[in-house]
Amino acid sequence: MKRRLSYVVVVAALGATAIPAFAQDGSERLPPSSAGAAQIAADGGRLTARVIEQALGTVLGEVASRTAVTLVAAPDIEQDAVSADIRNLPLDRALRELLKDYDTFFFYGSATQAPAELRGVWIYRKGTASMLQPVPPEAWASSRELKDQLAQADPVTREHIYESLLSRPDADSQAVVMQALRGATESDAELRERLLSSAVSSGVTFPPGLLSEMAITDRSEAIRLMALDALAQDPDVNQVAQSALGDPSEAVRERAAQILEPIPAGPNPDQDQPDPDQPNP
């Protein structure tokens, strides 16, 4: 049975830029580097990179931002420290050198009659990729492309798009999801309920005040209840729960009362406890 992994997706911005410290041919004009540094330049389909003990996810982000290639890394390798000294190699050869210690899938394709070119790379820990399936198509699209599709998509497709955006670490993707959760851009309450459940279970960091706002003002009873539950361990939950005591939903009022109910103090371990083997006086 084939396994599936979740992914951290780094989507490339089209175009190429170069760091001034690099010579055009990637030769000896490269400045000295220190541990934790990454110097990367791309030009004309070639890559130059000097990387010393830098997180793989950071390096992939730098490469993606300077090329037209989408890089997809399994999350368990994102913090791996990598080093490389690559001098003006064709992009695919440079990436093979950079990723030589990992399992990789290189995808070549073209939307026109032009020859196929490198479009994306999947990266996994060595020895783990033999039973994997490719990521779904929405994982290849940029956050902007996915956002543009939301207006015309049906609820099922929108849910897939939101889930894809939710898995991405960039601020733009997260902002689209949070606007949907607020109900500002998504009117399907059941879809928002499922999306909120996914966000909470995956440990997403919500903007300050968002859950409190949803717990008190959202038009969906289920979402108000879920937001209140998500806030149960928050230091400021009492204020939100006090407001929720006036909620029109009995279920929300009951949950708010439970949150406000003081937890009974347990026995003091320093206090002498009666010996169960001794008769009562």
Image (tube, grey):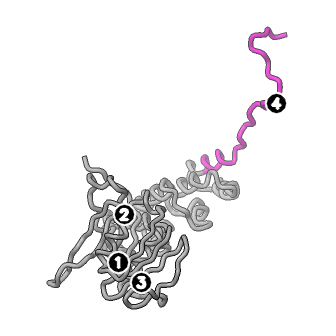
Q: What amino acid type should be assigned to the residue bearing mark 4?
A: Asp
Of badges 1 and 4, the one in the foreground is 4
The magenta stretch is: 253-281
The C terminus, quarter of image: top right
User: Does 248 appear above or below 51?
Assistant: above
Q: Of label 2 and label 4, which has the lower sequence position?
A: 2
Which label lies toward us, 3 or 1? 3
Cα distance, mark 2 to mark 4?
Answer: 54 Å
| Tag 4 residue | 270
Q: Position of residue 271 (x, y in %)?
A: 83, 28
- Badge 1 local density, few (<14 within 10 Å), some, or many (20+)? few
Q: Amino acid at mark 2?
A: Glu
Judged by its main secondary structure, the magenta piece is: loop
Q: Are marks 2 and 4 in contact (CB under 8 Å)?
A: no
Disc 3 marks which residue?
41
* Residue 169 on image: x %, y %: 47, 68
As helix, strand or loop, the secondary structure at mark 4 comes to loop
Residue at 73%, 37% in the rendered image: 264
